[in-house]
Amino acid sequence: MRSLQDSIRFDYWLFGSMFLVCIMGILGIFSIVYKNPGPIPTSILIKQVFAFAIGLLVIVFYLQSNYPTLKKYASGFYITSIVLLLLVLVLGTKVRGARSWFTLGFFSFQPSELAKLAFIMFMAKFIEETPDWHGWRDLIWPFVFLMIPVGLILLQPDFGSTLVFFPVCLAMLYVGGCNSKYLLSLTTIGGLTSLLLLTRTYAELKGNVGDNFLINIATNINYALVFLLVVFAIAWAVYFFLKKMKYDVEIKQFLAGISVVSIGILGAHLFSYFLKVYQKKRLVVFLDPYLDPLGSGYNIIQSKIAVGSGALAGKGLLYGTQSRLGFLPEQHTDFIFSVLAEQFGFIGSALLVLLLFVIVWRGIIIATQARDEFGALVASGIVTMFTFHIFLNIGMTLGMMPITGIPLPLVSYGGSSLVMNMFAIGILLNIRMKRFFY
């Protein structure tokens, strides 16, 4: 009887959409390696199909269990992921300048993919056990738990993989009841840091450093420090004036505002210091790919050509010239959407986007209908992870977002990514099925 109830409550929309998206990804990889004279080996297709089969087995196996057990093992998953991130820095295989992979014979494993899910589980457990948020001090531990994996992944270095941790953490804190003004402050810091970092890099590439006020703040640390001192002095003057006029104001409000601005500005300079030149270029060439048309901008230019040449119905499977002739770099990973858009056109691209939307939509429904807070938090984290990956990857291929090396979930080549994403879908299915029993 219980098995029948589970099957009735099985989310066929979510599973079916995931299955079709994976098939489209495999077709895209097949079209790349089929009689392709380029450097991409045929073995990647075998690896992807094998990872897909493993992912299906993981889903089937996990659906026999109960998602609340994730809470029991959340700390162990998180610690294991941290240990693996440490080990990969020493024992990992270096690929394209980043030591992010363990090579296990025929297969490779990327610990950062495990770290994403482990972080979601661990944060869900922590937030559920922290029912009352009293102030900034309650964000200290979430920030520590966030920065440990982020810091280790940056050391690889793999800047793209770190980005997803931030929106996931913010979304889970919001669902968990954290005060919105604190989350708004954190979002403002991230937005200001990103804006200044992009401004600095763009100005350096254009050769107009120091041309205006914003560029000076972004490029000159001394100028930025003087600006912060002026802001601090003005804030104090305004505070004392308001107190003199008998207005009921608190000093912590002014200090909070100054802190947000200061952290955002100094964060941009700090990130700029750690980012390599090629990473900086990849962040801004989407604004103008012809700043570096034969370097960092080349990928975006070729990607847009591939997407545009697909027109309405596409050139057909195996007939994509940009991918078949090797003009499109990283076509099996970062730019797999461009491959599919060229071969299946707007119609095929729209179908893929629609299927990905269904996955996100069903995930949101599952999060809102989860029986307990832990299930809602885990589902929210997974949905945010998928949404961020989809938005950034497709935006990147269309020249609307920076090139960050973030793959398209369930579509891009990568065994560990595919299995972990399918496991995440399995968790959502489990939360949906078990919500009436636990």
Image (tube, helix red, strand yellow):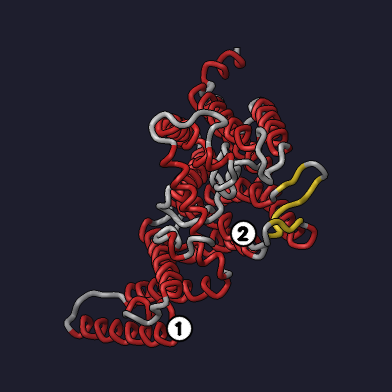
| Farthest residue, direction left | 245
SS class, disc 2: loop
Identify the residue shown where x is 61% and y is 37%: 32
Q: Which mark is drawn over residue 377?
A: none
Q: Quadrant of the N terminus?
A: top right
Among the 4 quarters of the image, the one containing residue 336: top right
Q: Is residue 365 visible?
A: no
Q: Give the total number of marks visible in the rendering.
A: 2
Identify the residue shown where x is 44% and y is 65%: 291
At label 1, counting other C-alpha atoms closer than 10 Å, the crowd grade (few under 14, some 14-19, many 20 or more) is some
Among the 4 quarters of the image, the one containing residue 437: top right
Residue 9 coordinates in the image, percent (x, y): 52, 20
Q: Is residue 105 left or right of residue 175?
A: right
Q: How far apart, in angstroms, are the residues tagged by discs 2 and 1?
A: 25 Å
Residue 244 vertical placement versus 54 (above, below): below
Identify the residue shown where x is 42% and y is 52%: 399
Amino acid type at image mark 1: Ile
Q: Is residue 125 left or right of residue 260?
A: right
Name the N-terminal-most of marks 2 and 1. Answer: 2
The residue tagged 1 is 221
Residue 186 coordinates in the image, percent (x, y): 42, 63
Q: Is residue 183 visible?
A: yes
Residue 22 coordinates in the image, percent (x, y): 58, 31
Residue 428 vertical placement versus 203 (above, below): above
Residue 289 coordinates in the image, percent (x, y): 44, 59
Q: Quadrant of the C terminus?
A: top right
Residue 358 vertical placement versus 119 (above, below): above
Among the 4 quarters of the image, the one containing residue 87: bottom right
Q: Which mark is drawn over residue 158?
A: 2
